[in-house]
Image: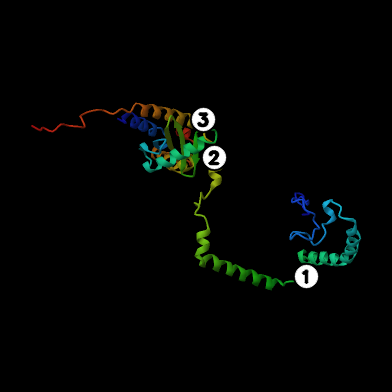
Amino acid sequence: MGCCFSDSSDKDGEEPYSSTNERARLLPEPTSSGQSGPSYNTQSQRNAQKLDEPSALEKILHKTVRKIIDVSPGETVEQQEYNDRAHQYGIKINMILSGSSKIRTSRPPLPNGMAAPQIVLSSAPVSLADIQLITLSAEKASQAVGKVRVQHKEDLVVPFGVP
Amino acid sequence: MERQLEKHLEETCRVPGISGALCADNNGLCLAARGCKPELAGHVASIAQQAAQLHPNSSTTPVICIESEGGSVLIKSENDVTMAIRGNSWVALKPLCMRRLSAIKRAMGYTTHLSNSLSSLF
């Protein structure tokens, strides 16, 4: 009701204002759904709207006041107090990081990596000679594995000398 | 029965700049290893299979190069056999080469400052 995907029409086919059903609406449907209500509700709607306007405006005002974050420099903080607070927060963070073991377990066990990645990244890329070397080596290894044969030297099953 | 394969690995490791070689099958079984731990066969085979999935319609298998400060590893699979070659990086070799070069120069009587090229000796 009220959103783009809703269908405000009653799927059961019953009248929305029927008072015999437990699902009957107590309040008329809003006019924003596009359907026009019965004529005897129009005047009451207008009167209700007039009464609700100031309360609606007040609601909007309170909602805006709650949601607005005031970033204007209200109270000024002295430099010394700012430094003291920063120092205290740093001490608290260090205590939490060094003390709690739960935070340590939550960190993923990733390797430290390289000390100077720029050295590896700035070096020359893989040369064509290296690619040819590995390609040739892989082909030769494949051929060598294909030539592996079992050398039959002696029988596995030996008949015992049973008279 | 794997004599030819071992001979191939020995020849590969004789190439300057290569410190190790490993051959594994597609299940991660180490078929032969020189200068590498056999336990790495599983990782090598798995990396090759994962990289091949990047281009499943490609007719050739990809060449994987893992670079680090200590060296690089080249991996390629061919017909259910995965080959890995570990090479020393120039970055890691440079101090070693420079030390050896300076020792050679001192032995030959050169007293000039360090030079970056071997051609200065000739």
Residue occupied by mark 1 = A74
- Tell if the residue under mark 3 belongs to the same chain as the one under mark 1: yes
- Point out residue A72 in the picture as x, y percentages from the top left corner: 78, 66
Is residue B115 among the parts visible in the rendering?
no
For the residues carrying marks 3 and 2, which lies nearer the camera in this image? Answer: 3
- Point out residue B83 in the picture as x, y percentages from the top left corner: 42, 34
Dot 1: element: loop
- Whether residues under marks 1 and 2 lie with C-beta atoms below 8 angstroms apart, the answer is no
Foreground residue, A118 or A105?
A105
Which of the marked residues, 3 or 2, is nearer the chain's N terminus? 2
Total count of labels: 3
Residue occupied by mark 3 = A128
Question: Left or right of A145: which side holds A129?
Answer: right
- Point out residue B113 in the picture as x, y percentages from the top left corner: 48, 42
Height in image: A121 above or below A139?
A: below
Q: Residues within 10 Å of mark 1 (few under 14, many from 20)?
A: few
Which of the marked residues, 1 or 2, is nearer the chain's N terminus? 1
Residue occupied by mark 2 = A123
Identify the mark at residue B51; answer none if there is no mark.
none
Q: Amino acid at mark 3?
A: Leu
Residue found 82% across the figure and 52% down from its top = A33
Q: Amino acid at mark 1?
A: Gly
- Point out residue A58 in the picture as x, y percentages from the top left corner: 84, 67
Mark-to-mark CA distance, 1 and 2: 54 Å
